[in-house]
Image (tube, helix red, strand yellow):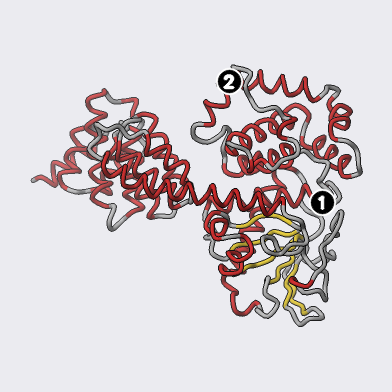
């Protein structure tokens, strides 16, 4: 009799009553099919809440065994009425199905509607900690009010988040030390990519622009052996080898394959935004976890997937190729492109241009249009108060060494995005090439834009403040 009544409910347009009936019968597939294509706008607030509750129950029920359907039910529940329980269930289901970006979006959107909800904050903080974003997790957890039932749990998790944030700060300091250390010292940074026949640890420090590797035409990977017996794999885009000359590719083929796929995606992403990619193959040095830790420090090994330095992308074997690290590789590949555009001599290029362009391309790759977290509103506030950092102050020192690197990177990205929108990416590419030929950046900037840098900076500030 109950099943017959359920069939009658589903035969007509789905109602709050039919949602209740499906939930009572635990007919979760039928519940989702009934409301999948339905717009919440066609229901009263009271009925919309009943439907959302039924969908949320389905998400909770299926989360342990069928995360895909649980995610669909939770997502639809939140579309009807955003309730904290449904937001958290949706995010957990997304994580179980490897949709970490979707989980983060769901949690951030939910937190905007429920800023004092401890459950959403804790789930978002856990995701951030997994992604090595300790500072972001600290910010989220610090906003959980004492009145929340989960305040104690949030405080416990806050300890881990602060520890991770401290590790990241130490990593930044070590990276700054590495960048400032003379190129001949291998205690922090190994020597630049050697030519064939030279060993990593025996190569002399290189001065001035560094030559790219030899070009080959094939897009398929070809294996070869150099004069020292080291295995090298290369195609037209990348030249892979291991930091340890004694390790061959057969020992770590799975890792190498994952890195190849991630870097190919980074190359295509950069080309789609910039219209150009590296013409010469990019050297890629594959480190083991122990090697990366030894040469770049334990905190850097825990915090980054890799970085571009010495005309090579240096990959950390301990880093998972997840969405966040994939975005990082896009960023680092852009540095490789800029290096070539500047004839492998970026000394005359301001840091805010180099880092800002890499960050902007990373934003485009991830679908972001604005800075993350607190920086969105913070930068607009600083712009309105005429308190943004000066571009001249961001010219020569690494942005990561600033007191608030997140602010500097975000502002640099917004500035470069503004340049591209006004003058076009081809013009920017031409400007980079002029700097590589020896032109002073500020003079070349005026020649390309018919405005001086100070006027451009002021207009960008006004543009940010007006949004």
The foreground one among 427 and 208 is 208
Circle 1 residues within 10 Å: few <14, some 14–19, many ≥20: many
Mark 1 → mark 2, Cα distance in angstroms: 35 Å
| Along the viewing direction, whichever of 282 and 57 lies nearer the viewer | 282
Label 1 sits on residue: 340
Above or below residue 70? Residue 258 is below
Q: Which quadrant is the C terminus positioned in?
A: top right
Would you place residue 14 above or below residue 95 in this image?
above
Q: Secondary structure at mark 2?
A: loop
SS type, badge 1? helix
Kindly give the residue lying farthest to the bottom in the view shown: 229
Q: Position of residue 351 (x, y in %)?
A: 73, 40
Left or right for 369, reference 134: right
Residue 265: assigned label: none
Report whether 38 appears left or right of 172. left
| Residue 191 image offset from top left, x and y in percent | 75, 64
Label number found at residue 467? 2
Q: Quadrant of residue 45?
A: top left
């Amino acid at each position: 009799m109950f099943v017959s009544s359920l069939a009658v409910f589903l035969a007509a347009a789905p109602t709050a009553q039919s949602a209740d009936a499906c939930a009572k019968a635990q007919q979760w597939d039928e519940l989702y099919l009934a409301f999948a294509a339905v717009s919440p706008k066609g229901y009263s607030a009271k009925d919309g809440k009943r439907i959302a509750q039924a969908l949320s129950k389905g998400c909770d029920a299926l989360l342990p065994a069928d995360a895909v359907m649980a995610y669909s039910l939770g997502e639809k529940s939140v579309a009807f009425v955003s309730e904290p329980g449904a937001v958290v269930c949706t995010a957990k289901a997304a994580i179980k199905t490897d949709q970490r970006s979707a989980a983060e979006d769901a949690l951030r959107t939910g937190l905007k509607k429920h800023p004092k909800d401890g459950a959403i904050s804790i789930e978002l903080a856990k995701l951030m900690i997994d992604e090595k974003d300790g500072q972001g997790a600290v910010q989220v957890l610090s906003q959980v009010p004492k009145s929340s039932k989960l305040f104690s749990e949030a405080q416990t998790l806050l300890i881990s988040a602060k520890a991770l944030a401290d590790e990241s700060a130490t990593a930044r300091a070590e990276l700054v030390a590495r960048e400032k250390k003379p190129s001949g010292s291998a205690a922090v940074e190994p020597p630049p990519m050697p030519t064939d026949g030279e060993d990593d640890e025996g190569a002399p420090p290189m001065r001035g622009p560094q030559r790219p590797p030899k070009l080959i035409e094939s897009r398929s990977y070809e294996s070869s052996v150099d004069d020292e017996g080291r295995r090298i794999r290369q195609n037209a885009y990348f030249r892979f080898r291991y930091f340890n000359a004694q390790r061959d590719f057969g020992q770590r083929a799975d890792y190498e394959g994952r890195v190849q796929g991630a870097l190919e995606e980074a190359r295509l992403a950069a080309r789609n935004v910039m219209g150009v990619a590296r013409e010469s193959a990019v050297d890629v040095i594959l480190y083991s976890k122990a090697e990366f830790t030894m040469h770049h420090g334990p905190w850097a090994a825990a915090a980054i997937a890799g970085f571009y330095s010495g005309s090579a992308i240096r990959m950390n074997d301990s880093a998972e190729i997840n969405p966040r690290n994939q975005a990082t590789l896009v960023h680092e590949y852009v540095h490789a492109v800029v290096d070539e555009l500047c004839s492998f001599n970026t000394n005359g290029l301001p840091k805010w241009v180099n880092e800002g362009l890499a960050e902007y391309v990373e934003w485009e790759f991830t679908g972001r249009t604005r800075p993350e977290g607190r920086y969105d509103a913070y930068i607009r506030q600083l712009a309105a108060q005429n308190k943004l950092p000066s571009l001249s102050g961001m010219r020569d020192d690494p942005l990561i060494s600033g007191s608030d690197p997140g602010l500097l990177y975000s502002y640099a990205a917004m500035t470069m995005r503004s340049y591209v929108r006004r003058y076009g990416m081809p013009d920017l590419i031409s400007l980079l090439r002029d700097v590589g030929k020896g032109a002073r950046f500020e003079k070349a900037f005026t020649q390309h834009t018919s405005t001086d840098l100070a006027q451009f900076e002021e207009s960008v500030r006004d543009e940010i403040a007006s949004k």
